[in-house]
Image: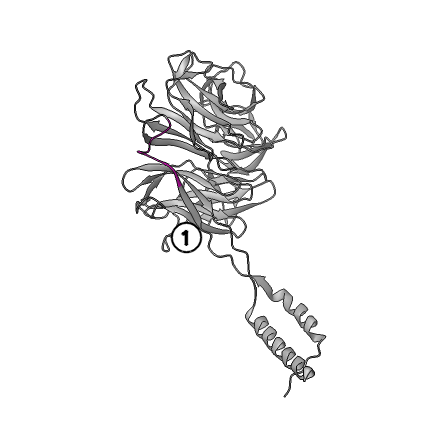
Amino acid sequence: MRLCFPTRAVPILLIILLPSIRSAPADARTFTTSKIVLTGETSPTGQPYRGFEGVSVSDDGKIAWGAYVGPLPAGVNNALFLADGSGVSIVALAGTAAPGTGGNFQSFHDPSLNNAGEIAFRAPVSGGSKDQGLFLSSGGVTTALSLEGDPAPGTGSASFTDFGPPDLNEAGDIAFNAGTDAFPPAPAAPPTGIFEATQGAILHVAAQGDIAPGTGGTYLILGLHCAINDSGSIAYLGDIYGGNVSQGIFFRAGGTISPLVLEGDPAPGTGGVFAGLWDPSSNNAGQAAFNAGVSGGSASGGIFVASSSEGHPVALVGQTAPGTGGQAYVLFSRYTVIDDAGDVAFQASYSTSYSLGGIFFYDARTGQIFPVALVGGEAPGMGGRTFSAFGYVMDINASGQVAFVAGLSDGSSGVFLATPDAPPDSVPTLSGWSAAALVILLLVYGARRARQAA
């Protein structure tokens, strides 16, 4: 029997085959990890680094961190630093004047950096009228944003007593948690609130006793970490008093506060419901990433992403942790970070003893997860030293670069930056039957053309 196809059949059959063409799964993403600074190296103070406190990375690759340094004659043992590509500079030093307090900085915590090189941070103060405050370094000048004892707007006559980590956006606006001396509505519930520093003013966002939308109750405790995106939308966690749920993640956008996720809502990918929520991070797409417990489902907890229109799981307890030889996630760190593409970096333990863990990267483009750095894994450029632990606070920028603090096997520690390599282009492929049919078609067509040429 002879197979014969007219020339015009070729485009017809190709059209038939096109629905069977699909993209091959992307190859595993890899990361290039660079050491930024290491204990024992000489800092710009002239003294060696002794340890690190917090890290932040901007979209253009600047990195800020706090560090303990060797003792100086003036007693300086803590400093805030910025690496901007041209070198490392000192932003602030312990023992120097803390603006607005009449005292001196003691140490520096939770830096948050934007592309302009501005850094928001919190710091305890000694020898002045204030014990602590939130500060902003901009253009080489440090100013006080809010200080202990300042009025807490929206709380009646209450004042600020302490501050949580600030989050700084590209417009220079800062969201932060703060404690107040307001009278608590329930025993053992320290008064807290979420506030915004913008254009020289401190604004009230939510505070203990405010109505918590969608819950039938009021806020009892506000989460320590809140997040602000470049449009000024703020995501935060709230424990609820007197309502039909005990927790929720809320989103303030355009002056309106709405619940994003509530305890008891379906936990996607598990068949269960949320039972325990942790502080969210957010991005410019209006998504929030968070750790949550799950009740009545196929997993006891996981990392999730939610927006006003959808939610999906990132990683679940019991799933295989990539790069670990088949071990499964058993516990997730409370704090996760998300970039504008929806990529998520998170920390997880993957052994029942909790002794092994790592930093992982969820690629929103493919839905795959890749290891960034693992306990016991070699630290690049460190002469064979391996990672032994990771600081729980890390940061991610718009390029998917992940900044983190890590301990090493010889007892040293450092600040590191993991840069994702460019994702491979997807390669069009055919299903088995379609590929075979296409081969036969091309062979027959080639033979026919050869006969015509003869």
* Residue 159 x/y as whole percent: 49, 16
Residue 285 location (% of width, % of height) = 59, 40
Q: Main secondary structure of the magenta part?
A: loop
Q: In which quarter of the image is residue 379?
A: top left
Instruction: Point out the residue furthest to the right here.
Output: 8
Q: In which quarter of the image is residue 410?
A: top left
Q: Give the range drawn in magenta.
A: 35-44
In reply to whether residue 383 is colored magenta, the answer given is: no
Residue 294 seen in the current view: no
Left or right of 200, for residue 94:
left
- On the image, which quarter does residue 403 sit in? top left
Using the rendered image of the protein, determine whether residue 258 is visible from the camera's viewpoint.
Answer: yes
**Quadrant holding the N terminus:** bottom right
* Position above or below: 378 against 160: below
In the image, taking residue 131 as reference, residue 173 lies left or right, namely: right
Residue 217 in percent (x, y) is at: 54, 29
Decide: few, some or many residues near mark 1? Use Cα within 10 Å; few <14, some 14-19, many ≥20: some
Expressed as whole percent of the image width and height from the top left, the position of residue 195 reads 53, 24
Where does the C terminus fall, quadrant-wise? bottom right
Classify 449 as above or below 357: below
* Kind of residue sitting beneath label 1: Pro
* Point 51% across, 50% down: residue: 422
SS for dot 1: loop
- Is residue 190 depicted above or below 428 in this figure? above
Instruction: Judge whether 107 appears above or below 32 on screen.
Output: above
- For label 1, the residue is 322
